[in-house]
Amino acid sequence: TAFPESKTVVLTGAASPRGIGRASAHYLAEHGWNVGIIDLDADAAKAVAAEIAEQHGVQAAGAGANVADEAQVRAAYDELEAALPQIVALVNLAGVSSPVPYLEVTADEWNRVMGINMNGVHYATRRAVESMVQHGVGRVVSLSSVSAQRGGGTFSKTVYSAAKAGVIGFTRSVARELGPQGVTVNAISPGPIDTDIMGGTLTEERKAAMAADGVLPRIGTPRDIAAAIAYLISEDAGFVTGQTLNVDGGLYMH
Ligand code: NAD
């Protein structure tokens, strides 16, 4: 099934000022997408949506939800679906880091990170694909991490790696099940990207050390990831599914 003429992408976790999500929302709006934003902070989600509508002349709306809470996710998605043109794509970006060493991981820390980074991807995806299969077309992209591919070694540690590796298996299986119904499902695995997720620890020295670990002489920018998202949710990427695209400056090759 072809894309509708007016199409919407919903992004979770797109409200933080220097985050990948907000940069991606702008980038996608520049490329003609209407934009829905779901974030923990409802006011921030609505403010970013208003800024996108004004700057790019597309339709945009924001709604608040904790992605770890299925009822909240469904309510927010219902709101966006009612307000915007057909939702063709979902991008799961809402996530938190977890620098806790494995021997210090409490049950609360485990459940917090799994709840947002893994369950949250499932809740939003589940709601989105229910509508996508009815339309016979859809794109889902979820943010994994190089941390899943090579077992940490970045900023976050085991709980984060486990959740982000879960996203890859989830992506492959949902891709397999929903391909026949016109929905592609892919993951992006970024290397270190210059945002605030590492909580102020990303000094110039740390950036240089992380860059030296890869092939290209810099760490990544939110725009590097936005461009990969734009490709994977495009109509022309309809033959790509179940994949994990490493956008990491050559940090991990396999
Ligand atoms: P960020 O902290 O700037 O953005 C995360 C966003 O998620 C924020 O807008 C925040 O409000 C939202 N969020 C957090 N918890 C939420 C919840 N419970 N419910 C709803 N929204 C919630 O981080 P970022 O660097 O832009 O990361 C975006 C995604 O990319 C994350 O999934 C992250 O794990 C992944 N990633 C980032 C890097 C990196 O180096 N920055 C590397 C690999 C993967």
Image (spheres, helix red, strand yellow):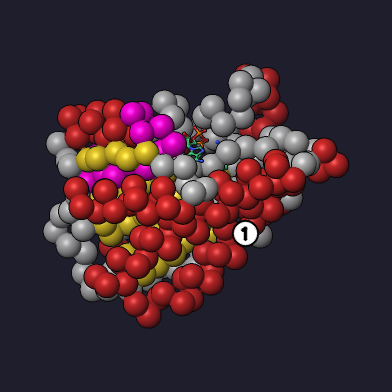
Is 39 included in the stretch rendered in magenta? Answer: yes
Q: Position of residue 22 (x, y in %)?
A: 38, 35
Quarter where residue 211 is shown: top right
Please tell me which residue is depicted at 37% across the width and 46% down the height of the picture.
11
Position of residue 109 relative to residue 133, above or below, is above
Please tell me which residue is depicted at 50% across the width and 59% down the height of the picture.
122
| Image quadrant containing the N terminus | bottom left
Q: Position of residue 154 (x, y in %)?
A: 70, 38
Please tell me which residue is depicted at 24% across the width and 70% down the height of the picture.
135
From the viewer's side, name the closer residue of 99 and 243. 99
Please tell me which residue is depicted at 52% across the width and 48% down the height of the picture.
68
Asked whether, in this view, residue 147 is left or right of residue 120, the answer is right
Is 57 included in the stretch rendered in magenta? Answer: no
- Can residue 29 be seen? no
Mark 1 neighbour class, 10 Å CA radius: few under 14, some 14 to 19, many 20 or more? some
Residue farthest bottom in this picture: 180
Q: Position of residue 34 (x, y in %)?
A: 22, 46
Q: Position of residue 77 (x, y in %)?
A: 33, 51
| Image quadrant containing the C terminus | bottom right
Ligand 1 within 8 Å, label 1 CB: no
From the viewer's side, name the closer residue of 252 and 16. 16
Position of residue 223 relative to residue 243, above or below, is above
Asked whether, in this view, residue 25 is left or right of residue 109, the answer is left
From the viewer's side, name the closer residue of 141 and 65. 65
| Helix, strand or loop for disc 1 | helix
Residue farthest right in this picture: 103
What's the magenta region? 29-44
Quarter where residue 199 is shown: top right
The three-letter amino acid code for the residue at tag 1 is: Gly
Residue designated by label 1:
166
